[in-house]
Each structure stands twice: as C-alpha cells, then as structure tokens.
Image (spheres, rainbow, N blue to C red):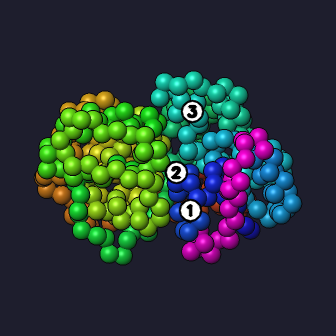
C-alpha cells in the first residue's frame, strides 16, 4: 500500500507543513513505506488545488491501494471521494491562527477544515494543546496524539558561533513584533542571527545595542547549520502546535527559548525548552541569558530528547497505520506529554 502525503504549499516553500512532509517522507521511505507527495507546486488557489488533489488521487490510485495523509489546514482533501481512506494530520486550523493573532477569521475555510477532520477515516495531532483548542468544535476523543518527527541530526554539528537565532517568517504570526523589544534587552556583546521570508521588511530599532545579522530564507542543510551554531533559538509565536523549528533546534543541540504556549511544554524538559509566560519580555530575556551565559545542557540530553521524539512518532504512526489499513483493532494512541504533572 502506498502512502500519499498532501502538501497544500509548494514543495520549495519553507514552512512547518512542508518541513514536516519532508521529514515524514524521509522516515517512512527509510522504513520501506512507498510514499508519494502531491504538493501545490503550481501555486493555484485553494479551490483549484482541492479539485486537482481529487483528480490526481482518482486517476492514479484505487481506494484500497492508498492511504492519504493531509493537513486540515486549507482542507486540501475536501473533494476526495468517501471510499478513499484519509488520515488528517492536524497542524493548526486557520481560525486558531487568526484568533491568536487578532486577525479576521475566514469562516468558510474554517468550516471546511472542521469538515475534513470530522469525516476523516482517522485523525492525529502532535499535541494535546491543539485538542483542547479543537474540543469545542470536534469530538477529539478518538484523535491520536504523537509528536512530529525531528530531522536526522547533523553528523558533525558546527561550533556555537552566535548567541541567539531567530528563524521563520518575519510576520506577526511568528511574533516578529516582539523582536525589537527583546533585542533591546540583550547586552552589546550578544550576537544574533535572524533569517526568514520577508526579512527585508524588518527594521532593527536604532536603540538596539547587540550585534544583529539579518538574512533571507535559509534552505535545507544550511538551515540546520545556522540553528546548530546558536546557543539559543527563539520561538515567539503566540501559538504553536508542535513547531518543526523547535524540533530541528533540539536535534542539532540548541536550547529553545520562547513563550509557554500551545504544545511547547509537551516537547521536552525545562533545561532544553526555556519557556516563560506569554508576553513577559523581561522573563524571556532572562531565560535567554541563562542559556547563553550559564551552564549548557550536555549533548547527550539533546540526543535523548530527540530519540524520544523520533520513537514516539514511529510508534504513533505505526499504531495509526495498523488501524487505518484494517490490520488491527486498537485504541486511541496517546503519547508522552512533558507538560503533564
């Protein structure tokens, strides 16, 4: 049976869903699972992409020969006929992103996203936090929970050449409005590297004293090298489900500092994830300083955390696969929650 991964974004665009799809395809093919990826490489509008997904699935595969995985975001499988088995992997419905960022909610899109979740053959989430957000809208009792897969660690991680890195879209969604207020709190000797889409629109405040280097989007292995070269990676989003940037940072031995929101606390312990209450910039600056200037976690701690994440994804995905393909009648898989008391 072939596994088909749907990506509503171009395969060349760097974002969480594209990164996730690439990591999953790599892991599954290494295990002998045949994978096909259908990405929106032509960058067509949402409705046209939904139709193209339906047409390509129906033309290339029989219902019994394929299991389709798609994000709920964008409702790419909205038109796929019912006989096809669809696994909806939750990333974050558009309405939750808009609500947390104070922007208007696209009601029709949200209803379509809820529809593909409700009608999915099987559904999974990488965090319990997202289930809590989704619970008022969907029965979440049967949704499996297992973290996203981290990347394969670098064979030879580079030396730590900069103190702090921020990597992601320079947009409110990723907390770009917190950057200058945070940079103002860093001492002059701190070196900060920042990279991502729309970085050309970001202006460093005139009263920032630390050394800041801003660059464009960083692709592939170069991205991991930049993350690995920092002592701290910043995550400033108002909500994250299971950030691929966080998983990448841990995989290359870099501490993450950010807000205690969404699924962040579930991923790893407090020595690797330095999380503070949302909006408390003084506390966040102190957390960064503790990681930059204080004792640093041992490489073995990063390896253990990354291995646990990889194992959990493998176990959760295999559990889902057995249920979805009718190979076993099993209960709902619920993985580790590092935030649990």
Of callouts 3 and 2, the N-terminal one = 2
CB under 8 Å between callouts 3 and 1?
no
Look at the numbered disc 1 and give the secondary structure of its residue.
helix
Residue 329 is tagged as none
Q: Tell me where residue 120 sits by quadrant.
A: top right
Of callouts 1 and 2, the N-terminal one = 2
Circle 3: is it few (<14), some (14-19), or many (20+) Cα within 10 Å? Answer: some
| 316 with respect to 287 (left or right) | right
Residue 134 is tagged as 3
CB under 8 Å between callouts 1 and 2?
no
Residue 29 in magenta stretch = yes
The residue that mark 1 highlights is 22
Of callouts 3 and 1, the N-terminal one = 1
Which quarter shows the N terminus? bottom right
**Residue 302 visible:** no
Residue 229 in magenta stretch = no
Residue 15 is tagged as 2
Q: Residue at x 28, y 70 (%)?
A: 158
Look at the numbered disc 2 and give the secondary structure of its residue.
loop
Q: Residue at x 68, y 32 (%)?
A: 109
- Where residue 307 appears, as percent x and y from the top left, is 39, 65
- Is 257 in front, or is 266? 257
Range of residues picked out in magenta: 28-48
């Amino acid at each position: 049976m072939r596994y088909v991964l749907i990506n509503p974004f171009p395969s060349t665009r760097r974002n969480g869903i594209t990164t996730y799809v690439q990591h999953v395809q790599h892991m599954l093919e290494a295990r002998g699972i045949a994978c096909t990826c259908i990405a929106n490489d032509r960058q067509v509008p949402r409705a046209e992409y939904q139709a193209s997904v339906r047409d390509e699935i129906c033309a290339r595969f029989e219902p019994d020969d394929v299991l389709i995985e798609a994000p709920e975001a964008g409702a790419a499988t909205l038109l796929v006929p019912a006989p096809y088995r669809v696994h909806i992997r939750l990333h974050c419905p558009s309405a939750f992103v808009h609500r947390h960022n104070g922007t208007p909610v696209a009601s029709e899109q949200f209803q379509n996203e809820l529809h593909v979740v409700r009608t999915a053959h099987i559904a999974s989430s990488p965090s319990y936090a997202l289930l809590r957000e989704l619970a008022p809208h969907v029965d979440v009792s049967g949704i499996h929970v297992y973290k996203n897969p981290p990347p394969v660690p670098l064979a030879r991680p580079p030396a730590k050449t900069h103190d702090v890195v921020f990597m992601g879209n320079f947009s409110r969604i990723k907390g770009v409005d917190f950057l200058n207020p945070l940079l103002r709190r860093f001492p002059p000797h701190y070196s900060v590297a920042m990279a991502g889409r729309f970085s050309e629109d970001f202006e460093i405040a005139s009263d920032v004293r630390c050394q800041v280097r801003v660059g464009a989007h960083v692709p592939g292995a170069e991205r991991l090298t930049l993350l690995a070269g920092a002592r701290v990676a910043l995550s400033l989003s108002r909500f994250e489900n299971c950030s691929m940037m966080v998983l990448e940072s841990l995989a290359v031995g870099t501490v993450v500092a950010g807000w205690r929101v969404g699924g962040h606390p579930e991923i790893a312990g407090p020595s690797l994830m330095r999380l503070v209450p949302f909006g408390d910039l003084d506390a966040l600056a102190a957390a960064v300083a503790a990681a930059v200037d204080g004792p640093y976690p041992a490489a073995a701690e990063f390896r253990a955390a990354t291995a646990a994440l990889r194992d959990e994804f493998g176990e959760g995905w295999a559990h889902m696969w057995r249920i979805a393909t009718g190979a076993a009648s099993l209960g709902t898989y619920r993985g580790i929650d590092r935030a649990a008391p």
